[in-house]
Image (cartoon, rainbow, N blue to C red):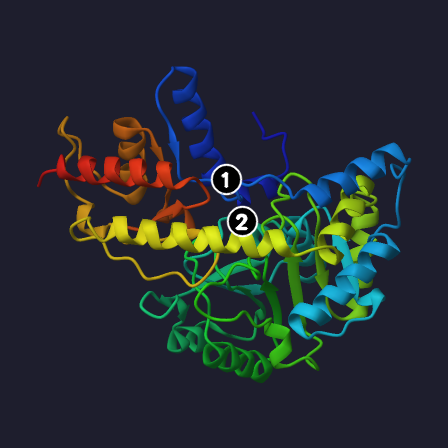
Amino acid sequence: MNNIFSDRLSRILPSATLEMTAKAAELKRNKMPVYNMSVGEPDFPTPTNIQNAGIHAIKNGITKYTPGLGTHDLKEAIQLKLKRDNNLSYNLNEIAVSCGGKHSLYNACQVLFQSGDEVIIFSPYWVSFPDFVSVTGAKPVFVKTDSKKQFEPNFEDLNKKINNKTKGIIINSPSNPTGGVWSDEAIKKTLQICKQYDLWIFSDECYEQLTYDVPFKSLASFDFNNKKIITFQSCSKTYSMTGWRIGYLAGDKQFVSQVGKLQGQSTSCPNSIAQHAATEALSGSQKSVLQMKEIFLKRRDLILEMLQKMPNVDCEIPFGAFYVFPNFKHYIGRKKPNGEIINSSKDLCLYFLSETGVVSVDGDSFGAPGYIRFSYATSEEIIIKAMNLVLESLKKLSF
């Protein structure tokens, strides 16, 4: 029987994070204890002032279609935010609001890439980057990074991978899954290479407000006159608004216009209620962001302390986001108590899940075999319990 579905779907994979969430839900249904360390969203409620803005929108009829690329008020709030926080000056016609940062990136890839193009992605990468590229018909090309230097690019490998088919490059700092934050030197060197080869640059900055040891600098602030830099930011992580689905991009007005053409034939416009709430998020009090960041820093230091107790587990100190990305390669090839061999970090994650109820995400899914991502967007109590359970389960593995 012929495949009735589009060939495009064969180019993409199911989400690894959603797969682990589904397995955890199954354990919960069976009344087993579950410690979810896989979640890619803050565990805090949306701040009250933002909730109230959403309620106000509902009660006052702000529930109709809006302009396709966002309301004037929200785009103005984004414009002021980019100047205030990132020292970037954009006109309103250089800003596009979408249904989340993920939607912005998807739209941008659809607008720019096509069959015959190659796009540089740094490993480890966010699970959706390769699929965003592949579904356009373009080819994702993976470049190594330095695990001892915030997962900054291996520049020798980067230069080897660029050719006359290379059209763009995707950068994610602070990073999901590593939490790595690139240094100024690494950013400048990358920009220099991109300019040399006339490449487009997508800078995913959705964790920009969550850096701990270094100040965040938006990539575009290093070379604002470069019209091939597109900046992506989001309300999801900063304001605990993951389900509200508001993100945005900023860049060249011709590029933004093409995004508008595409978005106008798909979502029509972002959610009007969420846009009203996002306007308050960006222009109102930022106190909740600072409070959340302070709590995340304490949790990060706690989970790093717990990981240090695990024999033969290495973990770079992440300077941003809310993930740790330890290296468990020493345990690949070991046997579980039932005699089965752990052949990959995915096997190890499934072992942790079945043995302890700890939910994590395997590094294989991020292009980093042997690594595992744990999120510390959860309580200190759960972090301590989960990490102790992981430690005990590692002791049960044998050669």
Would you say residue 259 is visible in this rendering?
yes
> What x and y, as percent, mark residue 345?
29, 44
Circle 1 SS class:
loop
| Image quadrant containing the C terminus | top left
Circle 2 SS class:
helix
Task: Sort mark 2 into few (<14), some (14-19) or many (20+) by Cα contacts within 10 Å.
Answer: some
Task: Work out how far the residue at label 1 is from the one at label 2, CA to CA, in angstroms.
Answer: 8 Å
Q: Residue at x 78, y 47 (%)?
A: 275
Q: Determine which quarter of the picture holds residue 396.
A: top left
Left or right of 232? Residue 378 is left
| Image quadrant containing the N terminus | top right
Picture disc at residue 320: none
> What x and y, as percent, mark residue 36?
41, 34
Residue type at the position of mark 2? Ser
Left or right of 384? Residue 152 is right
Residue at far top of view: 30
Left or right of 320? Residue 209 is right
Q: How many marks?
A: 2
Q: Are marks 1 and 2 in contact (CB under 8 Å)?
A: yes
Q: Is residue 130 above or below residue 16?
A: below
Q: Residue at x 75, y 74 (%)?
A: 89
**Which numbered disc, 1 or 2, marks the residue that appears first in the sequence?**
1
Q: Is residue 184 above or below residue 176?
A: below
> What x and y, as percent, mark residue 226?
68, 80
Would you say residue 367 is visible in this rendering?
no
Q: Nearer the viewer, residue 386 or 69?
A: 386
Picture disc at residue 15: 1
Q: Residue at x 54, y 53 (%)?
A: 291
Residue type at the position of mark 1? Ser
Picture disc at residue 128: 2
Q: Residue at x 17, y 31 (%)?
A: 340
> What x and y, as percent, mark residue 177?
44, 53
